[in-house]
Amino acid sequence: MDTWPAARVPSLPGQAPEPVVWDTATRTAAVAAPGRIASIYACGITPYDATHIGHAATYIAWDLLIRSWKDAGHEVRYAQNVTDVDDPLLERAARDGDDWRELADREIDRFRSDMTALRVLPPDHLIGAVEALDVIADLSAALADRGSLYELDGDVYFLRSADPDFGTVSGLGMAEMVELSAERGGDPGRPGKKDPLDPLVWLARRPDEPFWESQFGPGRPGWHVECSAIATRYLGHSFDVQAGGADLIFPHHEMSASHARVAYGDGEPAFARHYCHAGMVRLDGEKMSKSLGNLVFVSALRESGIDPMAIRLAIMANHYRPGWDWTSRGLNAAVGRLERWRSALAVARAGDGGVPDGGGAPEAGGVPDGGGAPDGLAVLTAMRERLADDLDAPGAIAAVDAWADAVLAGRVDDSTARSAGLVADSVDALLGVRL
Ligand code: 5CA
Ligand code: ZN
């Protein structure tokens, strides 16, 4: 399906260090992409409601990785799915008397415009489950060839015991896996399954639900096989990074990896070399989720007049990995920071130490003790170094804050004016914030 327009990324002088990320599976930090081509699959939305801050935070995290990869000289290949047929979407459409396809199309459109406004770079391939049915059929056929599927009352399950490496993504014990599977779309208690954790690959046609013909008869695809099939078709049987929120570690990423290993592994490594997960964004201490209904929508904030660059800054003030709380205090701080950065840029460009409203008076007599503000190259180097260290956006923001504070305190000299444009380009290219 169509993606969304790409924001222009200014090119920066010099070379960035190789981005290192935390890998959930190995529990170590690793160079995210050792080769020239860097490839990433990010799990996409299930489009039954608008994009909330939790979604936006995960896509901004991967956007930071992609921007750092580009800056380090990589060619990036990026694929993302849209789960445009699944239980939650069908349930919401039924509840509201909506047509499921119209609901999905409406929310996908809204997602595209939110991502565009937030200057999140688009994937090369944005692929819906429905348009990928052939791709899913190919992976399912490979699984069937390896004897890893079985039927239960017309539904088709994957035999997780076919994969000796099952469990290596999440590293969880059986009891925990069963519990999470029940919470997150699985059916560990269904009688007749060979193993409680075996996931559905194909659901036989249900009354009043959409269905498609397949090698297994009419029905619709399971969830994990969708991402396994789309990722391997568009990025190859193995690729650098599988990315998503931490709620996808188990069962989703475990299962997608397992499908690919059994279908395409043949003893070779298959699926992602690294698994990256963003912490859950909370509201009042609870995970922001469609099922709890405690959502802050990006589109609603935009409609209320909040600059999308402030939303982006409010998100990036938190490191992507631990979970964090969305608060109006955090948003207000980001609005203030954006204003300060823009004022500092105006002052630095003018090169005269004149401070606009609210910036505080510059000290008399030109540059005070302590010299001028850090020059553009120093700011860029600090930002690059922080972002290459597991996408430390708060660290990169602190480097820009130090520059802005110095400029607004009147510590401006010739080099401040000369390199003001470089600071603006660095903030744009690496943090995706246009000043
Ligand atoms: N379509 C599937 C993935 S294949 C899905 O999980 N869709 S979703 O719409 O529920 O979520 C889209 C992305 O946002 C996923 O990476 C999910 O882990 C992430 N996400 C959802 N809620 C939050 C939250 N509160 N905080 C952070 N990330 C979240
Ligand atoms: Zn997925």
Image (tube, grey):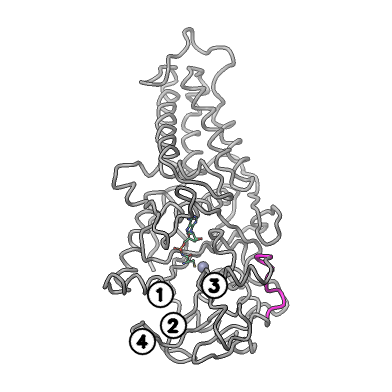
* Residue nearest the observer in this picture, 230 or 337: 337
Please check the rendered image and state whether residue 167 is part of the magenta-colored stretch, yes or no: yes
Please check the rendered image and state whether residue 382 is part of the magenta-colored stretch, yes or no: no
Q: Distance from label 3 to label 2 (Cα)?
A: 20 Å
The residue type indicated by label 1 comes to Val
Q: Name the residue under label 2.
A: 220
Q: Name the residue under label 1.
A: 85
* Residue nearest the observer in this picture, 96 or 189: 189
SS label for mark 1? loop
Q: Is residue 4 left or right of residue 15?
A: left
| For discs 4 and 1, the disc positioned in front in the rendered view | 4
The residue type indicated by label 3 comes to Ala
Q: Are marks 2 and 1 in contact (CB under 8 Å)?
A: yes
Q: Name the residue under label 3.
A: 182
- Highlighted range, magenta: 163-171
SS label for mark 3? helix
Few, some or many residues within 10 Å of mark 2 (<14, 14–19, 20+): many
Q: Do the residues labelled 4 and 1 touch (CB within 8 Å)?
A: no
Above or below, 391 relative to 363: below
Q: Distance from label 3 to label 4 (Cα)?
A: 23 Å
At 58% from the left and 49% from the top, the residue drawn is 322
Q: Are marks 2 and 4 in contact (CB under 8 Å)?
A: no
Q: Residue 207 carries which label?
A: 4
| For discs 3 and 4, the disc positioned in front in the rendered view | 3
Few, some or many residues within 10 Å of mark 3 (<14, 14–19, 20+): some
At 59% from the left and 73% from the top, the residue drawn is 255
Q: Does the residue labelled 2 lie within 8 Å of ligand 1?
A: no
The numbered mark, 3 or 2, whose residue comes first in the sequence reads: 3
Few, some or many residues within 10 Å of mark 4 (<14, 14–19, 20+): few
The numbered mark, 2 or 4, whose residue comes first in the sequence reads: 4
